[in-house]
Amino acid sequence: MNHMNMKHRRRKRRRNQSFLFTGILLLVVVSASANLWYGFGNAAKKDSVIEEMPFTITQDGMQAKEEIKKTVLETSYGGKQQVAEENHGNTQNAGTDEAWNLMLVNRDNAIPDNYKVNLASKGGERVNHRIYEPLMEMLNAAREENWGELPMVVSGYRTQEKQQSLYDEKIAKFKKEGYSDSEAVRQAEQWVAVPGHSEHQLGFAVDINGATYDVYLWLQENSYKYTALSSDTRQKTDITGTAEEVWHYRYVGVEAATEMYENGLCLEEYLEKKQSEN
């Protein structure tokens, strides 16, 4: 009997040791996986795996309202910074290099003709190389101020072809929901810019996915201070022609971002104000 009890205790100890080892291994895997999510999404992301998470920001926090995309990534953001150049055609207006950070692109203003962009990437999503460092500064600050939560860029620079694909998909989505052709286009253009009219095609705009709602609250209140990235003032839909997008951030420069934040201005209003002052 004692011999059987001893064997039972040994088997129990081995099971406990096995459970402990499995738990430790799982913790290591989870920790490593979390580190891979920080910063930029990888180019190998699966576009077919999408979750929609509806919310908007209020004084008291996040409440359900509209949609935000969260793309599931396969690998890390690690790697050296790479710079590439792309040309952009099929446009109309021109912009000066001195005011590059304030270039207005919306439903009424197309990307300047023969626009060229130098792109910086780290592991996947690309942005205009001139905003890369301030963007990373903001992401680092957001992580430090939000208990290690991991904000992530899920959409940066877009080609004309990518923007066209997103535009067509959104129209098709609204048609499937029963909207007429014209109404489907109108609804879609509140969420996806007409190709050639998107800030993402400038390389100045990013869509950021926060691990928690608190990250978005922090970004709205602090982004202009840390990195010259201003939250896109999408609640002014009568001016911008687009829906409210709390995840969308557009580079405008520290001076402009500060004034826009303090006075509650969108970029259209800020530029109009500056024009009237000159």
Image: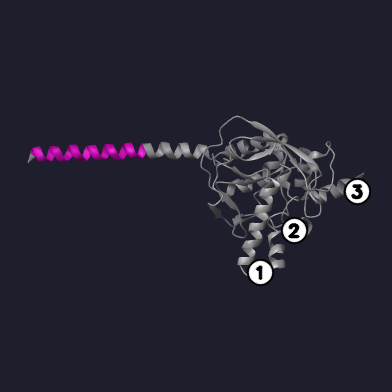
Q: Of helix, strand and loop, which one carries label 2?
A: helix
Give the label, 2 or 3, closer to the camera.
2
Residue type, numbered disc 1: Tyr
Q: Which residues are magenta?
A: 2-24
Does 261 sit left or right of 208 as displayed?
A: right
**Res 172 quadrant in image:** bottom right
Residue type, numbered disc 3: Ser
Give the residue number, with chain letter if any, for mark 3: 276
Does 40 sit left or right of 32 as displayed?
A: right
The quarter of the picture where the N terminus appears is top left
Give the residue number, with chain letter if any, for mark 1: 179
**Res 4 quadrant in image:** top left
With respect to residue 17, does 57 lie above or below? below
> Going from the N terminus, do you reach mark 2 or mark 3 first?
2
Give the residue number, with chain letter if any, for mark 2: 237
The quarter of the picture where the C terminus appears is top right
Percent position (x, y) of residue 259? 79, 44
Q: Of helix, strand and loop, which one carries label 1?
A: loop
Which residue occupies 32% across, 36% down? 21
Percent position (x, y) of residue 73? 53, 44
Q: Nearer the viewer, residue 254 or 247?
A: 247
